Image (spheres, grey):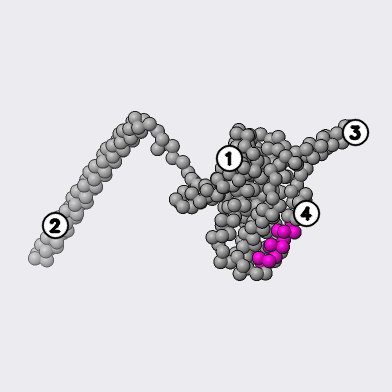
Amino acid sequence: MHPVFAAAPAAAVAVAQSGVASQQAAVPLGIEMFVVVVSSVTGVLSARQHKLDFVGALWLAVLVGLGGGLLRDIILQVGDVYILNQPLALPTSLIAATITFVFPMIVERQDRIIDILDIFAVGLYSAVGADKAMVYGFEPTVCVMMGFFTAVGGGLLRDICLAKTPSIFKRGNFYAIAAIAGSTAYIFLVQGCSVNNIAALTFSTALTMFVRWLSLHYNIQSPTEVDLTRVVPRRHRTADVAGARREVTARSADALADRRERTLADIQERREQERRKEALSRLKRMRRKRGQRKLDV
């Protein structure tokens, strides 16, 4: 292929990116870095729980803080990688991780606050991730998936590095489902209702936090199995129950006949043994009588 034609797609992508970058939801830089700090702190706390060293703590902090966005950008392949284009992201994550690792007492007893800030970060990440995919022209389902990856991808990579089953795949209160709800709400508001990006981002973040709070308050957990027999119409269930009862009755009759046959066989065998014992005892008595007669003679 001629070099001019080979360079054309790359140039087109670069032009497209320069146009779409200004259309993305403008999150204030302070909030952006605050969310990176919160996520990085949760990564360091996980590292301390698993007795990792300083390097391990930094690695988990970067994974949790920026891994979801990196995973999203790798999948989208649009050439705009957040961790590379935002010069403050990586240093902020590393500084927050270092301070937390050296002075853990700052956050050790703030579990409730950390949980609230963490789900706030999940809500914001889910909306921003969905927004980026939408701006680059991807389908709504892809946008929702990218919001999901951005929100929980860091925790997913953290659990994989710790050789654990990712927590988003295990039964528990809504976390991943809350992220999906937030990204879905964002795409619906922006594309379906033409709501302003910032307003939609605020609402979807609040919705993510509300769904998480709802599941914690009422202890609603993600299902691990589904029993469709509960949704079968009653008449079908009645027929099934009647059939099951007939089957149980037939099995009971067969079992009763089997038991009767075994009982009769046992009785017959015992009678045969008694007859043998009686014959042996008669034979012994006859032998004793014969022996007594010989002695008398």
**Three-letter code, disc 2:** Met
Contact check, label 1 and label 4, Cβ < 8 Å: no
The residue pinned by badge 3 equals 4
Q: Residue at x 59, y 52 (%)?
A: 120
Q: Residue at x 48, y 52 (%)?
A: 216
Residue 87 circle label: 4
Q: Nearer the viewer, mark 3 or mark 2?
A: 3
**Three-letter code, disc 4:** Pro
The CA distance from mark 1 to mark 3 is 43 Å
Could you classify mark 2 by the number of other residues whose Cα lies within 10 Å: few (under 14), some (14-19), or many (20 or more)? few
Say which label, 3 or 4, has the lower sequence index.
3
Residue 53 in the image: state x and y as whole percent.
68, 66
Residue 189 in the image: state x and y as whole percent.
60, 37
Say which label, 1 or 4, has the lower sequence index.
4
Q: Is residue 167 above or below residue 50?
A: above
**Three-letter code, disc 1:** Ala
Say which label, 1 or 3, has the lower sequence index.
3
SS type, badge 1: helix
The CA distance from mark 1 to mark 4 is 30 Å
The residue pinned by badge 2 equals 286
SS type, badge 3: helix
Residue 205 in the image: state x and y as whole percent.
59, 47
**Quarter of the figure with the C terminus:** bottom left
SS type, badge 2: helix
Q: Nearer the viewer, mark 3 or mark 4?
A: 4
Looking at the image, can residue 22 be seen?
yes
The residue pinned by badge 1 equals 185
The CA distance from mark 2 to mark 1 is 104 Å
Looking at the image, can residue 67 be seen?
no
Contact check, label 4 and label 2, Cβ < 8 Å: no
Q: Is residue 246 left or right of residue 57?
A: left
Could you classify mark 1 by the number of other residues whose Cα lies within 10 Å: few (under 14), some (14-19), or many (20 or more)? many
